[in-house]
Amino acid sequence: MPGQPNKKQKREEYRNTLNEKNEEGAMGELPKKKFYRQRAHANPFSDHSLEYPAEPGLMYWASLYPAFAVDEEMKDAPAQAEEQEQGEKAVARRKTSKQVEIADIGCGFGGLLFALAPRFPDTLLLGMEIRTSVTEFVQEKARALRNQNASSGLYQNVACLRANSMKFLPNFFVKGQLSKIFLCFPDPHFKARKHKARIVSTTLNSEYAYVLRPGGIVYTITDVEDLHNWMVEHFTNHPSFERIPDEELESDECVSVMMTETEEGKKVTRNGGKKFVACFRRPEDPPWP
């Protein structure tokens, strides 16, 4: 006789059942984290078989934000007719009425996203996470919250995709598209030989400056002082960023949410640890000589 199903089998059965319920539009059942746990570290230099657009114009955001979908004008009538015949796939070929403006890079289980979504109901928020199971958890939670709040329309503006931001950030966003970027409790990569894998570096900061509009802000938070000093040093020394004074951050609700609503932030609070915050504004580009 077959024995009891193992943990992996139970996890897969639970996730398949939950996915079917939420896709059918039933009253959303929030996913349980224990079925989506995954090791905290992922090698950003590995080939993770990721899907990403060749350039931002080829990304079909309507599949992530169906409430904001608008029909895309297609010059090729036969192609349009063929697309209509494909049913659900036609939805994926529709654009959205708004662009993503807020990105949480390495969003984890999405605590920050779901806390900010009701505060910015008319702004599209995107979580980018490299871990497969964690990404799926955020996607299922977003679907469930949308079903639970169908009458109010809340959480239609939040989504998550699996992506390696260190490699493909400019593939998703055009120049100056984002108003806010969050880097919350990134992997510290303590060993010196691993520092090249940190999410903040001279090269990556140039990419953040490219996708961030003038006046936009990069928010950083960590419980590792060495990493905090590293991020401050690299952003401060970059010509496209200037640090925002701490007194100015006291009135920024995003900072308070960032400190209290993320999974790691709650863990640090429970353990009585310190949180180090630093935010950087993208100034206007200097005029050409």
Image (cartoon, rainbow, N blue to C red):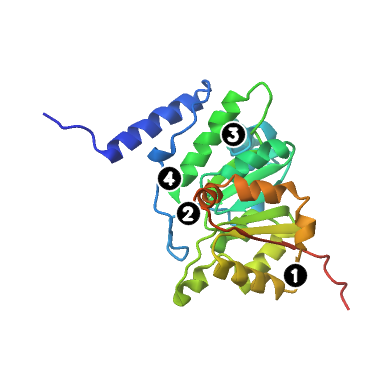
Which disc, if any, is residue 133? 4
Q: Could you tell me which quadrant the N terminus lies in?
A: top left
Q: Give the CA distance from mark 4 to mark 3.
A: 27 Å
Counting residues from the N terminus, which is met first, the one under dot 4 or under dot 3?
Answer: 3
Label located before the other in sequence (2 or 4) = 2
In the image, taking residue 14 as reference, residue 151 lies left or right, namely: right
Q: Are marks 1 and 2 in contact (CB under 8 Å)?
A: no
Residue linked to disc 2: 50
Residue 240 is situated, as x and y percent measured from the top left of the image, at: 75, 70
Sequence order check, earlier mark of 4 and 1 = 4
Which SS class for mark 3?
helix
Mark 4 → mark 1, Cα distance in angstroms: 35 Å
Out of 229 and 205, give the one closest to the viewer. 229
Residue occupying the point 54% across, 50% down: 269
Looking at the picture, how far across and down is residue 186, in whole percent? 54, 59
- Mark 3 vs 2, N-terminal side: 2
Identify residue type, mark 4.
Ser
Tell me which label, 1 or 2, sits earlier in the chain.
Answer: 2
Q: CA distance from mark 1 to mark 2?
A: 30 Å
Mark 3 vs mark 2, CA separation in Å: 22 Å
Residue extending farthest to the bottom is: 289
Q: Secondary structure at mark 1?
A: loop
Residue 240 is marked as: 1
- Please tell me which residue is depicted at 73% across the width and 54% down the height of the picture: 177
